[in-house]
Each structure stands twice: as C-alpha cells, then as structure tokens.
Amino acid sequence: MLTVLPQSLQPLVRQALAKAPVERPDAATILLRLLGAGTDSRQALQAGASAAADMHTPDTAPAPALGDAAEAAYQSLEIPAQTAAREMWLRLVSPGGAPDGSHDTVRTADDEELLSGRPEDEQSATHKAISSFAKASVLVHKDALVRPVSAAVLRAWPRLREWVDTDREALHTRRKLSEAASSWLRHGRRPDDLERGTTLRNALTWAATAPPRLRPNPVEAQFLRNSHTADTQRSRWNRRRNVFVVGILVLAVVSAGLLAWQSQVALAQREATITAQKQALSRQLAAQSDALIDANPDLAALLAVHAYRSSPTAEATASLDKAAALPLIRRLNTHNASVNAAAFSLDGRTLAIASDGGTVQLWDLVTFKNRKIVTNHHDAMLAMAFSPDGRTLATPGAGGTVWLWDPATGRARTTLNSQDESLSAMAFSPDGRTLATAGGSGTVWLSDPATGRTRKTLVVDPDRFAMVSAVAFSPDGRTLATVTVGEVRLWDPATGRSRTTLTGHNDVVNAVAFSPDGLTLTTGGRSGRVRLWDLATGSSRTTLTGHKGTVDAVAFSPDGRTLATASRDGTVRLWNLATGRSRTTLTGHTGTVYSAAFSPDGRTLATAGADGTVRLWNPATGRSRRTLTGHGDIVTEVAYSPDGRTLATASADGTVRLWNPATGRNHKTLTGVGYPYVSAVAFSSDGRTLAAGGSRGRDGAVRLWDLATGRTRTTLTGHKGTVYSAAFSPDGRTLATASADGTVRLWNPATGHGRRTLTGHGDIVTEVAYSPDGRTLATGGADDTVRLWDPATGHSRRTLTGHRDVLLAVAYSPDGRTLATGSADGTVRLWDPATGHSRRTLSHDDAVDTVAFSPDGRTLATGGQDRTAQLWDATLPDQATVIRSICNAVGRNLTAVERVQYLADRSQDSVCSS
C-alpha cells in the first residue's frame, strides 16, 4: 500500500503506522521532518508564519470575479463578434446527463474546429471573441488550442448557463456527432466508422433543422455526407438483393391482395349502406318526434334520443333541443294506480300523492324513493293537504270525516267531522288556522282544524248541484280559489264574497293551486292539459301538455320553480317552471329599450332607451349603477370601446356622445354627423375609429371618426336608405352596414371604398353581426329571416326562419357557437349557426330590440318595447347532457308497440339505459 508514496515519505509513514494511535506524530511534526528540521524546531513554523504576515502585497486592484469578467468581455464585443462568441462557447461546453446542468463541464477545442471552413468575416469575428475573453483571463489560447480557464465559468457566468440550458438537447446530439466525426478522422476516415441507421437519420434531421449557432463544422458536415452516401449505397444494394425475393412473393401476394381489396371494398360498401340507413332512420325519427312534440311529448323525446343515437344528423340534433326545452323534470311511476290528489310539503322535499285503494305515497324528491301510508279508506281519495308547518297531512275519510296524519310516522292524530259526505277538495290557509273542505254539495266549509268548528260557509252553487272539485288559498291567505265544472272563481275568505271568475277552460276543471308569489294560478282538468294563469290580467299564460288522462291534482313547490301534476294516467309529472324564464329583470327605463352592450370585463351592462337615457347596471345584482343623461331625444344605440374606457351612444338628436363609464362624464360630443337621426355606432377592433350611421334625406351614410382628434376621417356613401346597423370585422379591415334599401354593404374603412354589396333580403335589412372568427356575417331583416353570409365571397350560406315578424337584433356568442336573434314578435331565439336549427326560444312581453352576450358567453341581455332589460342564462347543454336530462324526466323506454310502430330497424337497444 505504501509503494504508491514517494520514496522519501515511505519510512516516515511506516514508522508512524507502527506506533499506537495515541503515540503517532501530529501533522506539524511530520511537516518539520519533511522540511529537514528537528521535531523540537516549531519556532521555524512560527517564524515562517510571521514572515508571511509581514510580506508586502503590491497595491493593485483585485481581479474581477470570473462571471463578471466574462460578461464584460462579451459586452465589449460588437454584434457579429457576440454571435461568434456564443457559437464558440457552445463548442467549449460538454453537457452532462443532469437536467439541471450540475454535471456539465468544459472542453478544449483547436483552432481548426472553431475556424475551418468559415467565411473570412466569421473567422475575424471569432478571432475577436477569442482575443477578448483571453485578455479577460476567461479563456486560454495557446498552441492553437482554446480552453476555458476553469469549469467554474459555467456557474459564474449566467449568460453561458442560459445558452447551455436553451440548447441542452441539441448540444447532446452535436456532442455525439462531434465525437464520432473526430474518431472517424483519427482513424483515417475508415468507412466502418461512419454512422448508419437510426443514429444517422437522427443526426441528419438535427443538422437540417439546427440553428446557425449549432451548425456542424466542416469535418462534421463531411462525416455526415459520407455517412449518408454510404448508407444510400447499402440501401440500394439491399433493394437489388430483395428485388428477386420480392418478385417471387409478388405473385402470391397479388392473389391474396386482390381478395383482400375486394373484401375491403365490400366492407366499405356495407358500411356506407349501413351509415346511409342509420341517417335515414335518424331523419325519419326526428320528423316523427317533431310531429308528436305537442300531442305526446314523452314519446317525442324518446324518439329524438333514438334518432340522435342512430346518427347525429342535424335533424336529430334539432329534435333533441326541442325535447330538452320541454319543462318536464321527472315522471314518477305509481305502477298504474290512478292518482287523484297531490300536495307538496312546506320544505319542498316531499310530495304526497293519493291513489286508488286508500293509500298515500310519500315521495322523497331528492332520491325519488317513496313510502306508503295505508289509510284504511277503501274509496278513492280526491283531495289531500299538508299543513304549513309540514307536520300534518289531511285526507278525506268515509262519511264526511277528515283525517289528520303525522307524515313522519304514518300514524293518524285525530279526525274532524265535515258537513259534506263526499269530500273532493281541501286546503290549509297559510297560517294553518283554517282548513277549507268542499265536495258534492256545492259548498266550501272553512273550519278550525284545532277545534273542528266551522267558521264560514261559501256557497259556490246555490242549487247544490255543482261539485267543488278543488280549493286553494293564496299565499297571503286573502284569496280562496274554487273550481267547479269549467269555472274557476276567486273569493275573499274573510267576507265570503266572490271577487272574480276565470274563464277559458273548455272542459271540466279538477285542480287548482296558487304559486308561492301569488302571481300565478294553475289549473288542471279532464283534457289532461294544465294551464298557468296570470292573476294580474286574468289571462292564460301557458299550457302544459303530456298527461294522457284527467289531471286531478296540481301543486307548486315552495320556491315556485316546480309544479307537480297528478293524473289518472297513473303518472305524476314534475315541471320546471323556470325553463324559458329570465334570471333577472332590469326595470327603470320608461320607454322602449333599444340597445344593450356589456363592458369588455362583463361587470357592467349599458342599456339605451326611448326615454333619452343610458343606464349602467350591475348584471350580477340587477341594480342600476348610474344613469347618463344629456341626449335630447331617443338613444338608439350603445357600444363600448375594446378597452372598456369609453362608451359611445347614438341618438335621434343627431349626435354621438362619448362617455367615461367609470365617472359618468360626457367627455366628447360628436356633432355635425350630417344627418338628423343616428341609428348605428360601432368601434373598430383597435378602438381608434368610430363608425356612425343614420339617414340623410333619402340616402344613408356612414361617417368614420378619428377618436383621437374627434374629426371625421371619411364618409361612406352608396346606401339609398337609412343605415340601421354597422359592424367591424374582428380584424378591423372590413365594415359591414345594413340599410333600409334592402342591402348590406362591405367597406374598406382604410380607403372608404366599397368592397361588395350583399343582396337577398326581400325587405329592409335591420341588423349585421360578425362571427368571432370573422368568417361569417349574420344579417336580419324585415322579411322575418336571418341570413348567414360568407363575407369573403358574398355568397349566402344559410337562411334561418322561425320568427314571425321583423328581425330587430342579432348577436354572436363569444365562442361563435350560438347566434341570438330578437324580433318584433316578442321572442328571442338561440340558434346553432352550424346547423341553422333553433335551440331555445325566450319571450318578452313585446318586441325585442336588442340582444347582447356577456364576454364569458354565459349571460344574454335582451331589451325591448316592454321597457325592460332582462338577463338570461345563455348556457346551452351538450347533447350527452340533454339525453341524460330527457331520460331522467321521462323515466321509461319505448314500449314494444312503440318499437314496432316507429323503429324500422326493430332495434332492441334501450333508448334510455336503466
């Protein structure tokens, strides 16, 4: 072991090791022995240390840190030399295997590697770089070799670390190539040392795409060329060798291939036939679904699902959307028992239904499970009622008795005696202190459920021939509704006087209920239809269809969003009354709301109206933030600048005002527009130009304003009627305008020249809107249609029909997948522009003049002549979600008879999986 030490040290170390550890000499003693001093001469060490301390150090500045010196040298170079420096340093680094660079090191390169084959100017730049770094003591350049002074430069110089990290993977590839090329050169360029196969292909790919700083040097490039040539020659020889073998195999393969090809053609033909058959079935089922949507909505919905699953044709998608728009939430199966009455508990979690055989089913509306209460009544129960606190359920019994039950335990608490032996209706007052009961005597009895005493008697039919089939208290307890054959009457229970009579049912009415807000009354009857009445006007608002038998009971959930209807067809239906209703109604304008626009951040909604004001709303709360006044006439249009800092408003007073929406101040008014009525404004995508359009005599014109100066840039003329709408394309290169002359014009706003005129509407064109990608232009007109155009060619792609009056508003959702349109028919339609099918219809009480999507596309703002702006949930579910909701609502599959009647393929697949 000691033989690896110098000869002079071996005796000393041997003597030290021979002693016990505690007796071995320390390092100082060994050092003195090596210096030739005695073991007692420690003064020599002290003297040496003292002398070193007294040595005078020349008064020179300390050398800068290695990284600072490298950066200073780099910064002193001109740009060509800096470029050469980066290429040089990347050749002086050898990347390691660690991703963080901890195993990186430096290497030596000769002048030939760095300079050979370079143009003269690049060689000069490389020489300057070498010289600068060598002068800074960062490189050593000697004997035609260049090397970094230390590997520490990798850690000390951040710029070098960044260079290496940026090209780390490529450096690994080049390092392998460089080593292979060097080996090839050292061995006399032997063919066996050339690259081949995958390694060669990877190297060639890298060399073809490598940035200039990583380009191969002449030796590496020659190595790659020779490798490629040799590999090509080998491939050619292999191909010639294989030709003969392949020729032998061809005859066998051709025969097999011909058979395979024929098989594939036949398979493709079969698949095409099957696809065509599925598409035909899909379209047929969709048509049948559309035909049944009113008469048999359950079957229509199931056919729509099967149509879409057969093939997702445009027709099937449209049928699915129609089925999804039905308000049905759930169909509860009572196993074919006739349902005669229904009542919600106060918390809305339980629904009680009475059926044949004297039983009451209590349904949990969260889990949709039920349990039964056996009342021991053998006759059918025609009425039932929960007390307001939900702790008591009242049911009719034999001989005119009323049973009060504990729904939690299913036990009877007590019985009350009624004056009517055939009870068909009952209801608790909102305070629970009064129970109204009625039946075949034509009289309503108001009793105290605690004592059983009668408080008041309402005589509905003095002749006592008309059976009172239903009674209901209004939420405030001040109105009682009674139902007899074909008639609904409203009473004051305090005085016993009749207030009004609702007419409109053309059949027997069996059920009645007030909505929790007291604004709506619902009735059901023998036809199976359910009507919703507006109590403010006394008119019928909506009719719900789907039951196949008499509706004997109706009940609202406590939040008013769900209506339960029970029928003799053995089903209970839960209807979503929120479907098609606005989320928020914004009131405050005293005239028509002509325009609405969301701010770019979606936090503010601006509306303009016939009252000459602009209102700024918080769409989250529905509260008005600010009212802008100043226009002298109707405000026809509002538009936000792209940055949201400016709000432009147009008016019939002939001006355009620019407002700061944050402060509400009018910081500029554009006058001299040139026409007395400004009906359209639009910002360019960069916010520098505002287009304003209107009428000038019989002609229409559009002015383009420079918002920085407030001056007119140009005036676009050509329309022969009022310009009602204007929209810039998303790239700002085209302006589209719609006019009363029945045309749409496309302009180049930079030059003011017209690019194209679109014709096709049969009347006034009122609206234009670009899709977010700028590839489609939507227009609406007085011909009640919406047209989708290709603005690049001017060709009409599709015409959307369905509105029954003039189109007044058009807007795309931010993702371009939904098109909203508003019409004088009082409706808003949401369309799928890809298929042209209407997916949802929303309603106002009057003409809809404006529609606008929030920036996130989740909210749609609409405004119109009913003097309101409304906010709607604009989210449309995907088809899988639609199918799940339909199946949950209908709760069944096609019957065997329905399959035979409607499914041409006699498919046994379940429409809705259980």
Image: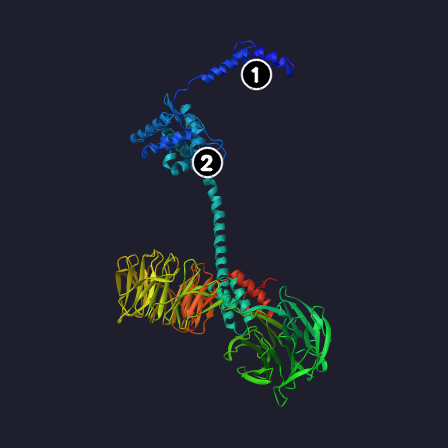
Image position, residue 761 (x, y; %): 34, 69
Look at discs 1 and 2 and give the one toward the viewer: 1
Query: In the picture shown, does residue 600 fall above or below 453?
Result: above
Name the residue at 61% across, 13% down: 16
Front residue of this view, candidates 890 and 438: 438
Count of numbered labels shown in the rendering: 2
Foreground residue, 224 or 565?
565
Res. 427 mark = none
Most extreme residue toward the bottom is 463
Do the numbered discs 1 and 2 sit on residues whose CB atoms are within 8 Å? Answer: no
Quarter location, residue 598 = bottom left
Q: Crowding at label 1, few (<14), some or many (≥20) Cα neighbours within 10 Å?
A: few
Where residue 210 sits, quadrant-wise, is: top left
- Which comes before the other along the chain, label 1 or label 2? 1
Q: In the structure shown, which secondary structural element does the residue marked by tag 1 occupy?
A: helix
Indicate the position of residue 148 as horizontal and vertical percent values: 41, 26
Closest to the observer: 446 or 528? 446
**Residue underneath mark 2:** 198
Q: Is residue 342 left or right of residue 235?
A: right
Q: Quadrant of the C terminus?
A: bottom right
109 sits to left or right of 719: right
Residue 248 position, x and y percent, is 47, 40
Q: Assign the N terminus to one quadrant of the image.
A: top right
**Colour theme:** rainbow
User: Residue 27 has which mark?
Assistant: 1
Residue 713 versus residue 132 in the image, above or below: below
Helix, strand or loop for disc 2: helix
Rendering coords of residue 845 (x, y %): 45, 74
Could you tell me the amino acid type at mark 1? Ala
* Left or right position of 336 against 73: right
The residues tagged by marks 1 and 2 sit, at their Cα atoms, a distance apart of: 59 Å
